Image (cartoon, rainbow, N blue to C red):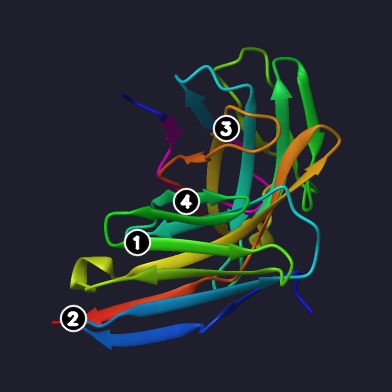
Amino acid sequence: NAGVTQTPKFRILKIGQSMTLQCTQDMNHNYMYWYRQDPGMGLKLIYYSVGAGITDKGEVPNGYNVSRSTTEDFPLRLELAAPSQTSVYFCASSYSRTGGSLYFGEGSWLTVV
Amino acid sequence: KNEVEQSPQNLTAQEGEFITINCSYSVGISALHWLQQHPGGGIVSLFMLSSGKKKHGRLIATINIQEKHSSLHITASHPRDSAVYICAVGLIIQGAQKLVFGQGTRLTINP
């Protein structure tokens, strides 16, 4: 079982470049999330989606965009990368709207120089 | 004050010791999650609790809703238990579960 798959695992970007972090899950989960984890800090929610075609902002959405054209895919787009976006990014999914275990991808390490 | 506070932030113990990690929160929640983050970075869900106690192998998680407190216990600890343990509380906002995360407890078990 693949679970939640994120790509790329590592990436170095120059300031001002753009890129997309890919996230795919094969568990037919409606709920998907993007988090970022900065050193010594708890995970922060960037964007989330409750189903195909529906997305909403989390705590730290500035500088990011998402789309959800299918149940399986939830890509995160970084526009005009800035050093403040250097972080580890995690995609996650869950089945239940009222809770349920979270399944995480392996993380994407992004450095903006 | 953070909505989710974990203690201790760092814990070092010898193999075989009984480990307790605590989590206190200040908001009403739908559920509480305990997660394990391995040194390589991957995050695994250990437990989801809304009341009482759950056990899986050597891991036990308890929650006291009235006191807004949860504990994660590890019995007969082993070096492979070394990881960061993260407490997260689930809030239902606009129809979706949103998690608020603690900063994590870094556990090191020495042989």
Q: Mark 3 lies on which chain?
A: A
Secondary structure of the residue carrying tag 3 is strand
Q: Mark 3 points at which residue?
A: A94
Q: Where is residue B89 in the image (x, y as percent from the top left)?
A: 67, 56
Q: Name the residue under label 1.
A: B59
Task: Depth check: give the residue in front, B54 or A69.
Answer: B54
Residue visible at 52% across and 16% down in the picture? A28
Binning the other alpha carbons within 10 Å of mark 2 as few (below 14), some (14 to 19) or many (20 upward) gives some
Quadrant in the picture for residue B94? top right
Disc 4 residue type (three-letter) = Phe
The C terminus of chain B is located in which quarter? bottom left
Secondary structure of the residue carrying tag 4 is strand
Q: Can residue A66 be seen in this view?
A: no
Q: Is the magenta stretch mostly helix, strand or loop?
A: strand
Q: Nearer the viewer, mark 3 or mark 4?
A: 4
Discs 3 and 2 share one subunit: no
Discs 3 and 1 share one subunit: no
Give the residue furthest to the top.
A70
State the extent of the magenta-drawn residues as a range. Answer: A4-21
Q: Which of pointers 4 and 1 lies earlier in the amino acid sequence? A: 4
Task: Say above or below: B51 vs A33.
Answer: below
Binning the other alpha carbons within 10 Å of mark 1 as few (below 14), some (14 to 19) or many (20 upward) gives some
Secondary structure of the residue carrying tag 1 is strand
Cα gap from disc 3 to disc 1, whole angstroms: 22 Å
Q: Is residue A93 rendered magenta in the image?
A: no
Q: Position of residue A35 (x, y in %)?
A: 62, 48
Secondary structure of the residue carrying tag 2 is loop
Q: Mark 2 lies on which chain?
A: B
Give the residue furthest to the left.
B111
Disc 1 residue type (three-letter) = Leu
Binning the other alpha carbons within 10 Å of mark 4 as few (below 14), some (14 to 19) or many (20 upward) gives many
